[in-house]
Amino acid sequence: MRIAVTYENGNIFQHFGHTEQFKVYEVEDGKILSSQVMGSDGNGHSALAALLEDKGIDVLICGGIGGGAQAALEQRGIELCAGQSGDADEAVEAYLRGELENTGANCDHHGEGHSCHEDDEGCEGSCEGCPGCHEPEPIEGKNVGKKCRTHYRGTFNDGTQFDSSYDRGEPLEFVCGAGMMIRGFDQAVANMEVGQVLDVHLMPSEAYGEADPQQIFSVNIKDLPGAETVEAGQQIYLQNAYGQPIPVLVAAKDETTITFDANHPMAGKELNFQIELVEVLDQ
């Protein structure tokens, strides 16, 4: 049996659709034989479910997960144990003892049952307007379904760089059209030639979507333990009704009320990419 856990710094990462790592455990006769950490090589629930299937994963342990991701895992015969938090190794041991309970699709981003935290991660939405809930139309092109290696540089409209694979010295590898990249990036690469360099300008609908007003909410400070110490502009983590942390920005604060923004930091932004297709691995 192979068990995968969404993973960060020894703990269960709380947002399945955006996890950058999995810790994979080899299990036999109810005992852990070995474990290793592997990269997710992108994000998006369909791509991650396909990756887990490709790696022969039987069970996924995670925190927050949406309905679309749950369905993708079910289609691939991967058992889900969602709603977990804390130490990854301990969670696997608890699973093997039969002590973990699966909550299924489990995220609520609308401010009920919250408390303030500053050291956890967020979760994937299962409600209307949350990322990861709705499948877009498939992308078409000669590179779709193939492993592509690209260098890229991402900038905002004012020229400020927000990311660059050149700076890291290693091309990004992903399966084109599998949902591992934002849609506009996938569409750009879908018909590129190896060695080609392409400049693209993406509107929010092609990137991280528009900001959702429903993800901005206010809470009375006296009803939110720990709110007295946070300041406007700070990123913190709230806890939903399932005890799972949600990343939010403190948008405003006065003497009695604190306002949070749970939108993705890139939501509503136009993005520019210079993309160089280095290699197509699956011909």
Image (tube, grey):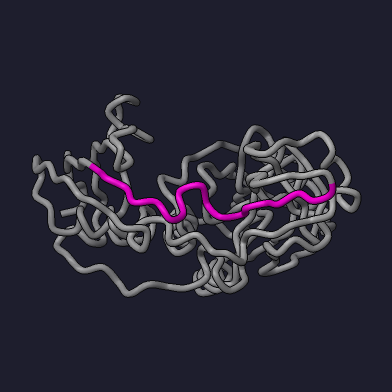
- 71 or 252: nearer the eye? 252
Is residue 89 something one can see in this rendering? yes
Q: Quadrant of residue 184?
A: bottom left
Say which quadrant the N terminus sits in.
bottom right
Which range is magenta? 256-273
- 272 or 177: nearer the eye? 272
What is the x, y in percent for residue 231? 72, 36
Q: Residue at x 69, y 59 (%)?
A: 217
What is the x, y in percent for residue 251? 64, 47
Q: Is residue 197 rendered to the left or right of residue 127?
A: left
Numbered marks: total: 0
Q: Is residue 194 above or below residue 95?
A: above
Verify whether residue 262 appears in magenta. yes
Q: Residue at x 83, y 60 (%)?
A: 113
What is the x, y in percent for residue 33? 66, 39
Is residue 13 something one can see in this rendering? no
